[in-house]
Image (spheres, rainbow, N blue to C red):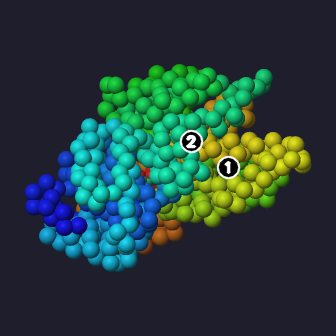
Amino acid sequence: ISSVSVILRRNIFSRRTEKTFNFTESAGFRGKAVDLDWIVFRVGLLSVLYSKYKKATVGVMITASHNPEPDNGVKVVGPMGEMMEGSWELSATELINSRDEDLELTLQQTINNFCIDATWPASVYFARDTRPSSPMLAEALCKALEMFHCTVKDYGILSTPQLHYMVRCDNTHGSYGVPTEAGYYEKLSKAFLAIMQPESNKGQYIASVMIDGANGVGALKAADISKYLKHSLSMSIFNDGSHGKLNYKCGADHVKVSQTAPEGVPVELAARCLSFDGDADRVVYYYIDEGGKFSLLDGDKIATLVAGFLNEMVVASGLNLKLGVVQTAYANGSSTNYISNVLKVPVSCVSTGVKHLHHRAADYDVGVYFEANGHGTVLFSDKAFNMIRKISNAESGDTCQKEAADKLLSFVDVVNQTVGDAISDMLLVEAILHERGWSIQQWNDLYNDLPNRQMKVKVRERTVIVTTDAERKTTAPAGLQDRIDEIVSKYPVARAFVRPSGTEDIVRVYAESDTQEKADSLACKVAQAVY
Ligand code: NG1
Ligand code: ZN
């Protein structure tokens, strides 16, 4: 720890601003890349302590996901590929904000507070996205890690979910997979190929997609996995970073929020198109129909497709497993209705942020969680996995049940259970559409989304807005909720809420109603009430 002060005396990574920074588990820290080297250095110190605390390999990912190219960020990944523990948020924030002269003391306090065995050999795996600033930040991270003689593995450029996968593989000694890029591609593609066996009748399904890589890491990794998928899925990859800017007028967040096709993708009639975000942990689908209408199939449509299919497979395997869906307030009202009333699957609503969704999904034997923005995955509990495996391995028994269980096992391996993963989720959706024999239009026709609008409002201090009921209502400032209720009551089948963003210095407004005009007008009125 004393070598920290040597580095600081050399003025390499000293604190350069008085501003206070909040370190959150799901977003870690994000900001303008030019201001971040000293923060990444400190997160490096934090990751070493976290590894010693967990007595396991942890991960550090350098990325700012869907945010613009000049931004960057850093977050810590726990041993099973989960987010850092909530109890560390305060220490992380203190460490980031401590004055240079107090840094050693703050580190020592963290060691004491968490009863960390400082002699335990730390192990940190890290990776970065394709931002031009990421190599410089990776160097700052290395400087911190070098001071502790810990095991360090630099994976270079990876998608965020790939790094989560590597960390989990390392800590589970091979039972989850091999912690290499080839290991990741082999696991996913082997399972996918097992499902996509050529069949005479695949109905309306055509194994071909157009991918918007957001000019980020997802484009590179999709090209890599396509070599393993052989001819089972043909991918045309656009926005591959060869000329466009990261996330600029493209990518999952742009498509979801603007509800339009991205630039750079020659969207063909009825073709199945999809957009990844900048670090490839989100995916949304879309297509243009004969009338030229653009239709978006977002995280809610993916959740309903996945939950409906897996539920049928669980029943077909003869298993009594509790399957449920977890959503946030941003989930389209129609999707929630469809899951509860048509699929008859339990659905819960939690606060925005992966940690909340992941945590609640773990309450089910099979937990499907997706944010409307396309971030999500499926969690299979050990109990579920063992029960499925038992039916699949049984020497005798019902052949239909065994077939369904065999197939379910392949689905388990297609899924990256550590965190939302654009590539794994794409394979999951493709495999289900193939099983169903559906076109994207048939999938979209399962239910109609309520027209909706998201807006950002810049306010002086966003934290004055306090929310409750999974962020669907505000408790402060006084009177705001009454005002929103009054506005909403003037619109048919309407719903609206506001919440401070956890990743940007803005307040988000969400509104839905029976027509796009009314959803837009409702969002504007609610935004005015916030302003
Ligand atoms: P904030 O900025 O707190 O709304 C956004 C997304 C989250 C999640 C995080 C982490 C929306 C409305 N919000 O959070 O769902 O993905 O980023 O990246 O999409
Ligand atoms: Zn992302």
- Neighbour class for label 2 at 10 Å: few (<14), some, many (≥20)? many
Tell me what residue is drawn at x 27 percent, y 50 percent: 142
Residue 334 coordinates in the image, percent (x, y):
62, 50
Res 247 visible:
no
Q: Quadrant of the C terminus?
A: bottom left
Per the rendering, the mark at residue 356 is none
Task: Please name the residue shown 59% across and 24% down the image.
Answer: 230
Q: Foreground: 370 or 40? A: 40
Q: Position of residue 344 (x, y in %)?
A: 74, 56
Q: Of all residues shown, which one is farthest toward the right?
A: 397
Work out whether residue 480 or residue 504 is closer to the camera in this orientation and state it: 504
Disc 1 packing (10 Å; few <14; some 14–19; many ≥20): many
Image side of residue 353 versus residue 530, left or right: right
Tag 1: residue type?
Ala
Q: Earlier in the sequence, mark 2 or mark 1?
A: 1
- 428 up-or-down from 328: above or below: above
Q: Nearer the viewer, residue 265 or 131?
A: 131
Residue drawn at x 52%, y 50% is 169
Can you identify the residue that label 2 sits on? 425
531 horizontally vs 440: left or right: left
- The numbered mark at residue 307 is 1
Q: Label 2 amino acid?
A: Asp
Q: Position of residue 361 (x, y in %)?
A: 60, 60
**Whether residue 307 is situated above or below residue 96 in the rendered picture:** above
Q: Element at badge 1?
A: helix
Q: For residue 345, which quarter of the picture?
A: bottom right
* Residue 157 image offset from top left, x and y in percent: 37, 39
Residue at (76, 26) in percent of width and height: 199
Q: Could you give the CA–CA distance between mark 2 and mark 1, rounded to whole angstroms?
A: 13 Å
Element under label 2?
A: helix
Instruction: Point out the image quarter for the N terminus.
Output: bottom left
